Image (tube, helix red, strand yellow):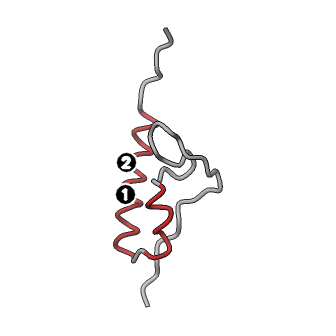
Amino acid sequence: MQTLPASPCINICRMDPDSGLCSGCFRTLDEIASWSRLDATARLSVLDAVDIRQRSQQTSPPARLP
């Protein structure tokens, strides 16, 4: 039996309307809703996307105020 990667959920469930991502786990609603049905390969693909999204959020320069 294959071990499935754990969910990246950290119980901060707020969807950002601009990005369409959860501000806690950086997943889309579709990724969150389908997580329990995904196999290990698909979960790893989502986790890779989450990692990229999270790193891009952390390295983005702060927005300038008018």
State the CA–CA distance, disc 1 to disc 2. 6 Å
Q: Which residue is mark 2?
A: 52
Q: Classify mark 2: helix, strand or loop.
A: helix
User: Where, quadrant-wise, is the N terminus in this rendering?
Assistant: bottom left
Residue 58, numbered circle = none
- In depth, the one of 55 and 30 nearer the eye is 30
* x, y percent for residue 19: 44, 40
Tell me which amino acid carries mark 1: Asp
- In depth, the one of 10 and 19 nearer the eye is 19
* x, y percent for residue 39: 39, 77
Q: Which residue is mark 1?
A: 48
Residue farthest toward the right in the current orientation of the protein: 11
* x, y percent for residue 35: 47, 69
- In depth, the one of 35 and 55 nearer the eye is 35
Residue farthest toward the top in the current orientation of the protein: 66
Is the C-beta separation of discs 1 and 2 under 8 Å?
yes
**Relative to 31, residue 66 above or below:** above
Residue farthest toward the bottom in the current orientation of the protein: 1
Say which residue appears at 44% left-offset and 60% top-offset: 30
